[in-house]
Amino acid sequence: MMEFNSRNARTWSMLGACGAFGLAAADLADNDDDFAVVTADLCFFSGLERMREKHPEKLYNVGIAEQNMIGVAGGMVKEGMNVFATTYASFATTRVLDQVKVTMGYMKLPVKLIGLTSGYSVGILGATHMSVEDIAIMRSIPDMVVLSPADCTETVKCVYAAAQCEKPVYIRLTGTQRTPIVYSGDYDFCIGKAISLREGEDVAVFATGTMVSESVKAAKKLEEEGISCTVVDVHTIKPLDVETIRKYADCKLIVTVEEHNVIGGLGSAVAEALCGMRERAPQLMIGIEDFYPHAGSYEHLMKISGLTAEDIAARIRISLR
């Protein structure tokens, strides 16, 4: 297993989530005879060059045939293999939905599906490659585990944890290269257990994916104005850590932040967890406001969707008035 230290955290950050996944996959291939990766013609974009060089017998490229990829991965799992499958998140959760539903959901085969470049990561390619609805889709499939790492260090943690999980898993990778670092060293990671990064009294911010680092920055800005914010990394969308969410429900404002449609994502999941509570704070959902933007750079798309630290702080500030 690779070491979790500041040096590796910086390396993984430079590579981005896809590169970090590739390094973790190569490491698993070193140590597990039954480990394999199936990809739909995305070896390079999956960061799998090192694995291809060291373990070509454990890497299967089915070509641009994403639906077939799930069937192949499922068949390999039935034969006792530990299989990860990779493709763009937009294809993994829409084009392949029927196969995911049947093979991973209904048949409960523990395929580990990696949704590459989710959210706006490759927004320059347009709406066809934006994946802003994948959380809503995947968390609705029975028995599916949905992971959304905050940075590249947590991406490696998610991959290692998924390899040990006996359920089907979807890992949502957001961000680009030079991903902001949230975790610079080792820490306890457990599927289904959210992580509180900072404690505050006024606002509880539940964030996932790239929005964790932006939410921490927003909290620091608000702290200068006398607004105290808790920030929680919700790396597991399903099963959701309901206990931690309810722990902070008595603050002044609950906020969810995600690089995903505000419908059906983390915000909806948190609202569902809190709906039975009589005494709870109002909730502000920050995310992509139910639209597909035109193609643009990652930075541009984040800005027009109000997902920068400055935008998050402004929305919280207004809601507290």
Image: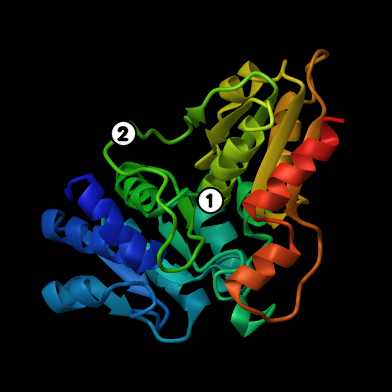
Instruction: Using a 10 Å C-alpha cutoff, classify the residue at mark 2 as few (fewer than 14 neighbours), some (14 to 19) or many (20 or more).
Output: few
Q: Are marks 1 and 2 in contact (CB under 8 Å)?
A: no
Mark 1 neighbour class, 10 Å CA radius: few under 14, some 14 to 19, many 20 or more = many
Q: Residue at x 70, y 47 (%)?
A: 312
The percent position of residue 170, horizontal first and vertical second, equals 49, 54
Residue nearest the viewer, comparing 306 with 208: 306
Mark 2 = which residue? 187
- Residue 173 in view here: yes
| Picture quadrant where residue 39 is located | bottom left
Q: Can residue 266 be seen?
A: no
Identify which residue is drawn at 55% across, 28% down. Answer: 241
Q: Position of residue 122 (x, y in %)?
A: 56, 76
Quadrant in the picture for the C terminus: top right
Vertical order, 264 against 271 (above or below): below
Residue 247 x, y percent position in the rendering: 62, 17
Q: Residue at x 33, y 43 (%)?
A: 161
Q: What is the quadrant of residue 126 in the picture? A: bottom right
- Residue identified by numbered label 1: 209
**Residue displayed at 69% across by 31% down:** 225
Describe the element under mark 1 as helix, strand or loop: loop
Mark 1 is on which residue type?
A: Gly
